[in-house]
Image (cartoon, helix red, strand yellow):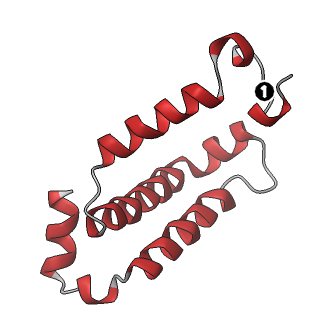
Amino acid sequence: MKEINHFREERDWRKFHKLKDLALSVSIEAAELLENFQWKTSEEAIQENFDNIQDEIADVLIYSYMLASDLNLDIDTLILNKLEKNKRKYPLEKSKGSKQKYTEYN
């Protein structure tokens, strides 16, 4: 996070990074990531676009990290909290080896 913030502060870009715009940028970069896979198998996409896939994943993460930083949120805590919620939604006895969504459990 320190390197990301240093990069944007050096360029005086923080003033352009409103929360709404950072959230939009996460989605835009995710769409650019998806473009690498459009009309291809996963294997074809990786073979043809691996470098760009890496760059787009990095862009998604960078914008996500900036958004979390500007909201004073700790990434590790966010992830651990979400994993705990997912453990409750997807208990092992119902979810292991299944692709069902939790709303489809009996």
Answer with left or right where residue 87 lies relative to residue 65: right
- Determine the secondary structure under disc 1: loop
Mark 1 neighbour class, 10 Å CA radius: few under 14, some 14 to 19, many 20 or more: few
Q: Quadrant of the C terminus?
A: top right
Residue at 55% in and 26% down: 87
Residue 72 in which image quadrant: bottom left
Residue 97 in which image quadrant: top right
Residue at 19% in and 71% down: 7
Residue 31 in the image: x percent, y percent? 63, 65
Q: What residue is shown with label 1?
A: 99
Disc 1 marks a residue whose amino acid type is Lys
Residue 3 in the image: x percent, y percent? 17, 60
Is residue 80 placed above or below 52 in the rendered structure? above
The single residue placed furthest to the top in the displayed view is 93
36 and 15: which is toward the camera: 15
Residue at 42% in and 74% down: 22
Residue 34 in the image: x percent, y percent? 66, 57
Answer with left or right where residue 78 lies relative to residue 40: left
Residue 46 in which image quadrant: top right
Residue at 71% in and 42% down: 44
77 and 88: which is toward the camera: 88
Q: How many marks?
A: 1
Residue 101 in the image: x percent, y percent? 77, 34
Is residue 9 placed above or below 39 in the rendered structure? below
Answer with left or right where residue 95 lies relative to residue 77: right
Is residue 65 placed above or below 94 in the rendered structure? below
Q: Quadrant of the N terminus?
A: bottom left
